[in-house]
Image (tube, rainbow, N blue to C red):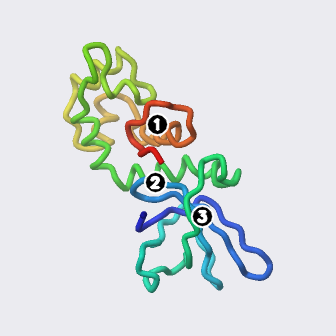
Amino acid sequence: MEDYAYILDFNISPDGKGLAYMIGADRFTFLTGVIKKGTTPKIGEKYYIGKDKQKREVIDVVKGRISFQELTEGARMNLKDVLKRIVKENETRYVDFLNNAKPINTRTHTLEFLPQIGKKTLKIVLERRPYSSFKDFQDKTGLDGVEIFAEKIYRELSGKDLVKILTIRI
């Protein structure tokens, strides 16, 4: 189970009952949850949803997992921006990925599964390793690491990419 989730979208009815559409901070799990009465979540914000119910300030009950297709249109529209935030907040993890990714076989490298990285760009990325940050990566390659990783994660979660290197299968 996820301990934290980011709000993608929410609905609050006139009687005060609310439902939030969320993405887990660690495993990229799509979830729905009941919003505590008297609170209003902020889209893109990270909230505690773990087992300790007393620590939950905004989400009262996590109802369960949902699929990408079950997200509201608003949640889908906000997803890329939230993924960019998640990637930025976990910069070290993704920079380490760039620095440590290995070839899959003699013809294909793991980094080629990232958007904007083909054979020619791969050569540049590998030659200029290691990277200390996304800024360093951009300075050395001209590529926006946050955009690349957010797009790849979005493609994996939406089912557009069958090869999953950054998300888990549910």
Measured along the vertical axis of the image, is residue 68 above or below residue 130? below
Residue that badge 3 annotates: 32
Position of residue 108 measured from the top left corner of the image (x, y, whole percent): 32, 18
Residue that badge 2 annotates: 85
Q: Sequence-wise, which precedes: disc 1 or disc 3? A: 3
Position of residue 9 measured from the top left corner of the image (x, y, whole percent): 64, 61
Residue found at x 72% / y 73%: 12
Circle nearer the viewer, 1 or 3: 3
Measured along the vertical axis of the image, is residue 134 above or below residue 2? above
Residue that badge 1 annotates: 152
Instruction: Indicate the amino acid at tag 2.
Output: Arg
Q: Quadrant of residue 119?
A: top left
Please tell me whether mark 3 sits on a helix, a strand or a loop: strand
Q: Disc number at residue 140?
A: none
Position of residue 169 measured from the top left corner of the image (x, y, whole percent): 45, 44
Q: Sequence-wise, which precedes: disc 2 or disc 3? A: 3
Which of the pair 44/47 is nearer the observer?
A: 47
Position of residue 28 measured from the top left corner of the image (x, y, whole percent): 46, 52
Please tell me whether mark 1 sits on a helix, a strand or a loop: helix
Instruction: Indicate the amino acid at tag 3.
Output: Thr
Circle 3 crowding by C-alpha within 10 Å: few under 14, some 14–19, many from 20: many
Circle 1 crowding by C-alpha within 10 Å: few under 14, some 14–19, many from 20: many
38 left or right of 121?
right
Circle nearer the viewer, 1 or 2: 1
Instruction: Please report contact status of discs 2 and 3: CB closer than 8 Å, yes or no.
Output: no
Circle 2 crowding by C-alpha within 10 Å: few under 14, some 14–19, many from 20: some
Residue found at x 52% / y 36%: 155
124 left or right of 162?
left
36 left or right of 152?
right
